[in-house]
């Protein structure tokens, strides 16, 4: 009976291992695709009056800025500067949403990496490991 139990346990472990390897291979092949899609990402936002258009890349870096020719007649320099800043911020927010959506295709929503993309908190990257270490410490105290 023990031998059969051992075989059953070994089969179950092997099946779980095969599943984990399969998930890793899907994730790994998907990461190459995700990296290519990120490299091509460019998101544009326009000011409410249509005078300013800002385009940013996947990390929120400004890659293009266009003005309507009438912008200098309709805005004073300070107002134009504020409009530019708000338009770039809007493009960055749209980019962040698109990057999160793209990453969400490959990583679980509750993963540390996904949370880091949402909140920018480096603690999110290690939250799972922190929890494991706390639990291990609690076990040692017993």
Image (spheres, rainbow, N blue to C red):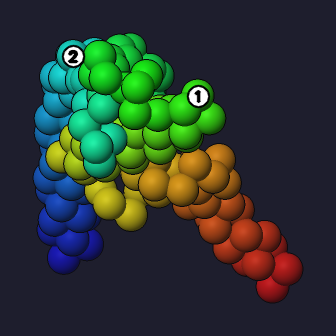
Dividing the image into 4 quarters, which one contains the N terminus?
A: bottom left
Residue 18 is situated, as x and y percent measured from the top left of the image, at 16, 43
Q: Earlier in the sequence, mark 2 or mark 1?
A: 2
**Horizontal side of residue 27 vs 92, given as left or right:** left
Nearer the observer, 136 or 124: 124
**Local SS, label 1:** helix
Label annotation for residue 100: none
Residue nearest the observer in this picture, 36 or 67: 67
Q: Position of residue 33 (x, y in %)?
A: 16, 22
Nearest the viewer among 120 and 43 is 43
Q: Which residue is mark 1?
A: 77
> Nearer the observer, disc 2 or disc 1?
1
Residue ID at (26%, 31%) = 44
Residue under the image location 21 percent in, 16 percent down: 40
Q: Confirm or deny contact between disc 2 and disc 1 (CB under 8 A).
A: no
Q: Image quadrant of residue 142?
A: bottom right
Mark 1 residue crowding within 10 angstroms, few (<14) / some (14–19) / many (20+)? few
| Residue that sits furthest to the right in the current view | 141
| Left or right of residue 135: residue 2 | left
Describe the element under mark 2 as helix, strand or loop: helix
* 64 to 48, vertically: above or below: above
Q: Residue at x 43, y 22 (%)?
A: 72
Residue 56 visible in the shown view: no
Pointer 2 local density, CA inside 10 Å: few below 14, some 14–19, many at least 20: few
Q: Residue furthest front?
A: 73
Q: Position of residue 110 (x, y in %)?
A: 39, 63
Label ID, residue 40: 2
The vertical placement of 18 against 134, above or below, is above
**Residue at mark 2 to residue at mark 1: CA–CA distance:** 33 Å
Whether residue 83 appears in this view of the structure is yes
């Amino acid at each position: 009976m023990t031998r059969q139990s051992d075989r059953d346990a070994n089969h179950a472990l092997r099946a779980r291992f095969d599943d984990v390897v399969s998930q890793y291979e899907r994730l790994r092949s998907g990461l190459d695709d995700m990296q290519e899609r990120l490299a091509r990402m460019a998101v544009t936002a326009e000011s409410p009056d249509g005078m300013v258009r800002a385009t940013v890349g996947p990390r929120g870096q400004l890659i293009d800025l266009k003005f309507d020719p009438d912008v200098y007649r309709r805005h004073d320099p300070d107002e134009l500067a504020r409009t530019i800043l708000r338009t770039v911020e809007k493009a960055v927010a749209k980019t962040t949403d698109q990057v999160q959506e793209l990453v969400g295709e490959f990583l679980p929503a509750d993963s540390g990496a996904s949370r880091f993309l949402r909140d920018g908190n480096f603690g999110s990257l290690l939250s799972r490991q922190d929890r494991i270490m706390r639990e291990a410490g609690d076990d040692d105290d017993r």
